[in-house]
Image (cartoon, helix red, strand yellow):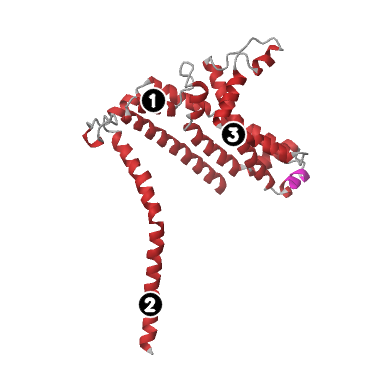
């Protein structure tokens, strides 16, 4: 009798261990994949930043040069120009947020055909980037519809794709337009999650529409602001396809971003320099994201 009582917990323990082993075996391929495709390249690229490696020979035989690759990249004026160009494109984040909030608030009023407008605004998000580039190149052409419209007011044709300043403007506007649909849906979901009780209480206290928006609605949309800003910065710092296809990084390197600069180093078999750029980019994005998270955490605790 007593023996059976002792054996039952032992059997349960053995069964529990077996179930754990089976569970770990199921997730083992995931860990192998993470180790092989993320952890190993992570450290491999870090090691390559301290060597002069062209990618044509094994990394182990490449000469070790210490921080020479970092010095070479950080002293390159083109790197800083690309870094500046990348930061300039981030101007599109607040522009997109302002437009998205305005449109989302209009749609949230229960206007007719709201569902149709949602679909229209979301079309650029799901459209092929190639189709979007072709559309914008046609629109921004010196003989395109935008210049035709400006000509009605006597404005001379603007070379949107050939002048550095206008090329940056065209790229930013295209990025804003392309991402508008996602931001609108996020803000619309945020607005619909705000209880009318807050607005009614503010009205009783004598607040007008602008005061209700600025002191009630806008702060309560904080999590949405936070998400859009963080994802916008991460996406903006990884910008490659749009400036490369629309403008080829030009004119006069005006739209050469960090990722275009990075891939140019790869193409020139300067792999160590490319790895340095990747690490500088990664550290910068990590710091900005950490600051955003910390700021949001402090605001929520206050």
Going 67% across and 40% down the picture, which residue do you hit?
215
Q: Position of residue 45 (x, y in %)?
A: 33, 37
Residue 211 visible somewhere in the drawing: no
Q: In this view, does 27 lie above or below 132?
A: below
203 in the magenta segment: yes
Of circles 2 and 3, the one toward us is 3
Q: Which residue is drawn at 30% across and 33% down?
A: 49
Q: Position of residue 207 (x, y in %)?
A: 75, 40
Q: Which of marks 2 and 1 is nearer the N terminus?
A: 2
CA separation in Å, label 2 and label 3: 58 Å
In magenta segment, residue 267: no
Residue under label 2, please give it.
11
By secondary structure, the bulk of the magenta-drawn segment is best described as helix
Q: Give the range drawn in magenta.
A: 199-204
Residue ID at (39%, 78%): 9
Q: Which residue is drawn at 34% across and 24% down?
A: 268
Mark 1 vs mark 3: in front: 3
Q: Distance between the residues labelled 2 and 1?
A: 62 Å
Element under disc 1: helix
The foreground one among 274 and 80 is 274
The label shown at residue 59 is: none
Residue under circle 3? 127
Residue count near mark 1 (Cα–Cα under 10 Å), binned few <14, some 14–19, many ≥20: some
Q: Residue furthest bottom?
A: 1
Question: Crowding at label 3, few (<14), some or many (≥20) Cα neighbours within 10 Å?
Answer: few
Answer few, some or many: residues within 10 Å of disc 2's Cα (few below 14, many 20 plus, some between 14 and 19).
few
**Image quadrant occupied by the N terminus:** bottom left
Instruction: Kindly identify which residue carries mark 1.
Output: 264
Q: Residue 159, percent across and down?
A: 57, 13
Q: How far apart are marks 1 and 3 (CA)?
A: 27 Å
User: Where residue 157 sits: x, y (%)?
Assistant: 62, 11
């Amino acid at each position: 009798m007593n023996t059976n009582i002792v054996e039952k917990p032992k059997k349960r323990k053995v069964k529990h261990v077996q179930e754990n082993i089976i569970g770990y075996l199921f997730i083992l391929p995931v860990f192998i994949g993470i180790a092989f495709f993320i952890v190993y390249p992570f450290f491999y690229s870090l090691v390559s930043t301290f060597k002069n490696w062209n990618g044509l020979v094994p990394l182990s035989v490449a000469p070790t040069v210490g921080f020479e690759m970092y010095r070479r990249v950080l002293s390159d004026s083109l790197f800083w120009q690309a870094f500046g160009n990348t930061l300039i494109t981030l101007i599109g984040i607040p522009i997109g947020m302002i437009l998205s909030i305005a449109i989302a608030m209009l749609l949230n009023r229960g206007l007719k055909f709201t569902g149709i407008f949602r679909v229209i605004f979301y079309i650029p998000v799901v459209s092929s980037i190639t189709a979007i580039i072709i559309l914008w190149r046609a629109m921004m052409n010196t003989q395109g519809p935008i210049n035709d419209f400006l000509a009605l007011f006597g404005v001379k044709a603007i070379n949107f794709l050939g002048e550095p300043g206008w090329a940056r403007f065209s790229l930013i506007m295209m990025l804003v337009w392309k991402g508008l649909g996602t931001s609108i849906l996020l803000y619309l979901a945020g607005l619909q999650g705000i209880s009318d009780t807050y607005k009614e209480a503010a009205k009783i206290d004598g607040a007008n529409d602008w005061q209700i928006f600025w002191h009630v609605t806008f702060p309560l949309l904080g999590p949405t602001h936070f998400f859009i800003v963080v994802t916008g910065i991460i996406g903006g710092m990884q910008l490659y396809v749009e400036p490369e296809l629309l403008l080829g990084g030009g004119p006069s390197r005006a739209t050469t971003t960090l990722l275009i600069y990075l891939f140019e180093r790869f193409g020139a078999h300067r792999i160590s320099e490319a790895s340095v750029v990747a690490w500088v980019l990664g550290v910068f994005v990590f710091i900005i994201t950490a600051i955003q998270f910390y700021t949001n955490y402090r605001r929520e605790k206050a």
